[in-house]
Amino acid sequence: MLRDSFELIPMENGISAERRHQATVVLSMYVGYAWFMVLRSAPGAVVTAIRTDIGLTKGEWGQVLAISTAGAVVGKIIGGFLADKIGGRATFAIGLIGCSWGITAFGTSVSLGVLQVTFFLALLAKSFGWPAMTRIVGATIAPSEWGRAWGILSTSSRVGAILASVGLGALIAVAPWRTVLAVVGGTGVLVAGLFAVIQKHAAAKLAGSRQQNADSPNAHAELAVDPLHPLYEKTVGQALWRFACSRQFWLITVSLTGMTILWDFLQILPLFLQDTLNMSDSGASVAASAFPWGSLLSVLAGGFLFDAMSGRRMAWAMGGLLFVATCCVGAFYAMQYYAPPTGTDVSLSVVILFIYGVCIAPCYYIPMSIFSIRFGGMHAGFLVALLDAIAFGGNAGFQLIGGELADRGWDQYLLLLGSVAFVSAVTMFAFMLGEAREHDHQRASSID
């Protein structure tokens, strides 16, 4: 059976057949992961309707989010190992089907316990997506294009979030929330089937091209099978020890955990907008859509800039972006005491959330993904899963505390969130400086 371990076939004059098949692989991942994000975002997009229907409190919703995040943590580890065992294509398809069924079941829930269990299972399956894509990207994309590849693929999550916030925000205005989730889940199963068929065809074509061009001196080898990599043919235990001894690993872990918390602010944001600015269900959902629009633009540009700019400049850029995100949290804190002029509440919230999205997305997706391939080598899939699992675990703890703080008052919640944002900015700056020094060291060694 063909696996996704084929190499990138080099680009020749014009667009080669191999390049077209490679683009097909990337496009199918793009669409599939976009729908992963629609599924993940759907409960948050309809949470105000759920609260109206079954009387869900902010504290109870915080519990649902915390337990579902625990499912994401478990899913990251399972997904990382599963992608290595059966391949990225199969892991991706299984995860998309499982997440679709989980969200459909979530829409049939009549009690808090069922909401918790079904969302737990949905996010467990959803977590298979990124480790599976790491496996496929590492096998099909040349190292010189990692930044732009992840920048392009990362926009798929933003497209999915936009579809969820705008499309579902409009749909919830004309249909019951249970119907909305059933439609989203059913569509997800169809997308998974198409992904499996398209990937199988494209992988077969690429594998055939690889055999025909096996002796090409220009063929790119995967970093995962580079015999000079420190983790080449090392066990998972040996890889874990190297991770644990790395300052860079812990810096990106802390920063990524903070950014995950900042990202999941969107799950509770509609409740904040309703309570603070008295927005309607649809108004709160539309305002929240500004975040993915901002992140969609910035993560695409960020991928190309990552390949083009020096490491030290990127350190200042990404540290600065997260500092601005901290200021956006401060702006929401101030809105509790200084109400915006009448009629400007939605537009002001849209501007703040757009900037918030611009600042977080490139810092969240690109450094972690590239670091996982470079530092993890043949264990890149496991490393990216481990980083996400730790970050999601920290987020679960924050959600448990944050939901209770929000019930007492939004000021306490936002003060804690702002502190998290500041720590994330500082550690991202230190991490990127470390990556720049590592790059300079490798370049000096190659010259010597």
Image: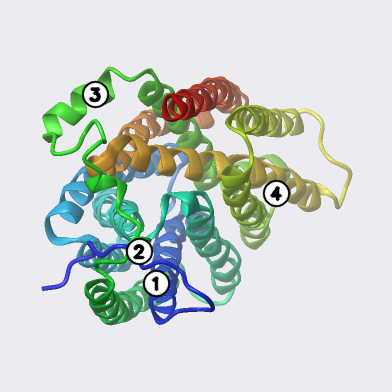
Give the x, y percent position of residue 160.
50, 64
- Contact between marks 4 and 3 (CB within 8 A): the answer is no
Residue at label 3? 242
Camera-side mark, 2 or 3: 2
Mark seen at residue 8: 2
Give the x, y percent position of residue 341.
89, 43
- Contact between marks 1 and 2 (CB within 8 A): the answer is yes
Residue lying at 63% horizontally and 46% vertically, measured from the top left? 305
Quadrant of the image containing the C terminus: top left
Q: Secondary structure at mark 1?
A: helix
Residue at label 4? 354
> Which comes sooner in the sequence, label 1 or label 2?
2
Say if 239 sits above or below 309 in the image.
above
Q: Secondary structure at mark 2?
A: loop
Residue at label 1? 22
> Which comes sooner in the sequence, label 2 or label 3?
2
> Which comes sooner in the sequence, label 4 or label 2?
2
Residue lying at 30% horizontally and 54% vertically, measured from the top left? 221
Identified by mark 2, the residue type is Leu
Q: Is residue 156 visible?
A: yes
Give the x, y percent position of residue 384.
32, 41
